[in-house]
Image (spheres, rainbow, N blue to C red):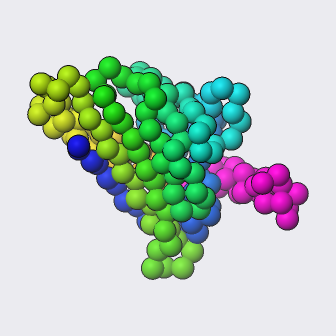
Amino acid sequence: MPVVEAVATVPVPPELAFAVSQTTAPVRYRWDPFVREQHFTDGATRPGKGVRTFTRSRHGLVMVSEYVSFAPPTNVGMKMVRGPWFFEMFAGGWRFAPAAVPGHTVATWRYSFRCRPAFLRPVADRVGVWLLSRDIRRRIAGYAAGCADPEVLAAARRSLAADDPADGGTA
């Protein structure tokens, strides 16, 4: 099964780095060049294990994905529930770890997929690796820029405060 990965070190601590990665529209559109439209489904208002999201990519493709793990501030994982016909399976995981430089985070994003139909897999997988590698590199570069964008950081900090019961949040 093909896997693509991108890594970036961002100048914010893991809690804030994770929160930036989970920002939603309209803030998400400031940093995520891949997403043209994204929202939670089934009445959900926050990310969490079992929550589903609708995403329309910059390519016009639509995918409904589900959080299979949600462990702030270290990792999040998703799997495709419904998506483009050429994906038999698609999943992604984003990890956030303290960097060697205090107050910085190493973000590692990894996607795995399987194309269909099976007889086209040898070619489709190579094309998929090329396209997804390009997209994941652009996406993590946008994320890194978002980690330096005052508006994105302010929204991420607000979400952290809302999650902290000591700050009056509802965690």
Q: Is residue 79 above or below residue 20?
A: above
Quadrant in which the C terminus is drawn: bottom right
State left or right for residue 157 relative to residue 84: right
2 magenta-colored: no
* Span highlighted in magenta in the image: 145-171
The percent position of residue 36, horizontal first and vertical second, equals 50, 28
Q: Decide which of 34, 119 is in the foreground and name it.
A: 119
| Residue 141 shows in this picture | no
Residue 98 x %, y %: 50, 73
Looking at the rendered image, the quarter that the N terminus falls into is top left
Where residue 128 sits, quadrant-wise, is top left
How many numbered marks does the figure carry? 0
Q: Can residue 24 be seen in the rendering of this structure?
A: yes
Residue 152, x across and y down, in percent: 63, 50
Question: 11 or 96: which is nearer to us?
Answer: 96
The picture places residue 4, in percent across and down from the top left corner, at: 28, 48
Which residue occupies 33% across, 33% down?
89
- Seen in the picture, residue 18 relative to 47 is either above or below; the reply is below
Q: What residue is shown at x 12% (from left), y 24% (from top)?
A: 119
**Does the stretch in magenta take in 146?**
yes
- At a point 54% along the width and 27% down the height, the residue shown is 54
Image: 78 above or below 54: below
**Magenta portion: prevailing SS class:** helix
Query: What's the residue at 32%, 44% (across, down)?
Result: 112
In the rendered image, the residue lying farthest to the right is 168
Q: Viewed as shown, does residue 83 lie left or right of 167?
A: left
